Image (tube, rainbow, N blue to C red):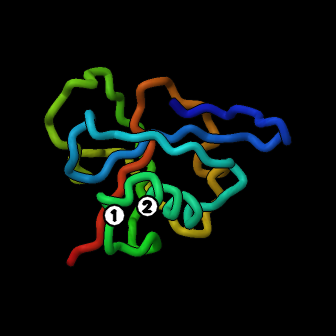
């Protein structure tokens, strides 16, 4: 769920559902982050949230894409790939999250697709 919740100090937070490219929707995970942060901070939060998945990968090597993919069937086991997503946008490290996610999104939506570096 993407939500613009006001925290006690009036900074809005975003609740972003993330998924690694090629993984199934059932492996999606949530990252909660202040909307005042930029994409580079989100990259670090993602790496911290799943240290085993991103082991030996620097946070700045994760390519993040914004998307809006309904995850209505949480038990769905088919992999989601960037190639199959028509509407996506590659995020740059300096983009402020409040500008990337200006609109509220419906619940049960994947917001971020994480592309791992090619080894």
Is tag 2's residue or tag 1's residue first in the polypeptide sequence?
2
Farthest residue, direction front: 52
Position of the C terminus by quadrant: bottom left
Q: Which mark is residue 54?
A: 1
Please give the name of the residue rendered at 61% of the width and 35% of the height, measured from the top-left corner.
103
Horizontal and vertical percent position of residue 16: 51, 41
Please give the name of the residue rendered at 26% of the width and 22% of the height, measured from the top-left corner.
73
Q: CA distance from mark 2 to mark 1?
A: 6 Å
SS at mark 2? helix
Asked whether 48 or 83 is in front, the reply is 48
Asked whether 49 or 12 is in front, the reply is 49
For residue 67, above or below residue 74: below
Residue 88 falls left or right of residue 14: left
Residue 38 falls left or right of residue 22: right
For residue 4, above or below residue 86: above
Query: Which image quadrant is residue 17 in?
Result: top left
Dot 2 crowding, Cα within 10 Å, few <14, some 14–19, many 20+:
some
Horizontal and vertical percent position of residue 4: 67, 34
Q: Which mark is residue 87?
A: none
Horizontal and vertical percent position of residue 45: 52, 57
Q: Which residue is mark 2?
A: 47
Is mark 2 in CB contact (under 8 Å) with mark 1?
A: yes
Query: Which image quadrant is residue 85 in?
Result: top left
């Amino acid at each position: 769920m993407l939500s613009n919740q006001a925290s006690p100090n009036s900074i809005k937070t975003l609740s972003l559902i993330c998924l690694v490219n090629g993984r199934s929707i059932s492996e999606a995970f949530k990252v909660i982050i202040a909307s005042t942060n930029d994409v580079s901070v989100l990259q670090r939060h993602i790496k911290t949230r799943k240290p085993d998945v991103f082991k030996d990968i620097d946070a700045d090597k994760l390519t993040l894409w914004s998307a809006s993919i309904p995850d209505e069937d949480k038990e769905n086991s088919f992999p989601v790939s960037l190639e199959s997503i028509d509407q996506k946008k590659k995020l740059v490290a300096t983009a402020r999250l409040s500008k990337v996610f200006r609109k509220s999104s419906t619940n049960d939506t994947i917001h971020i697709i994480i592309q791992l570096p090619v080894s």
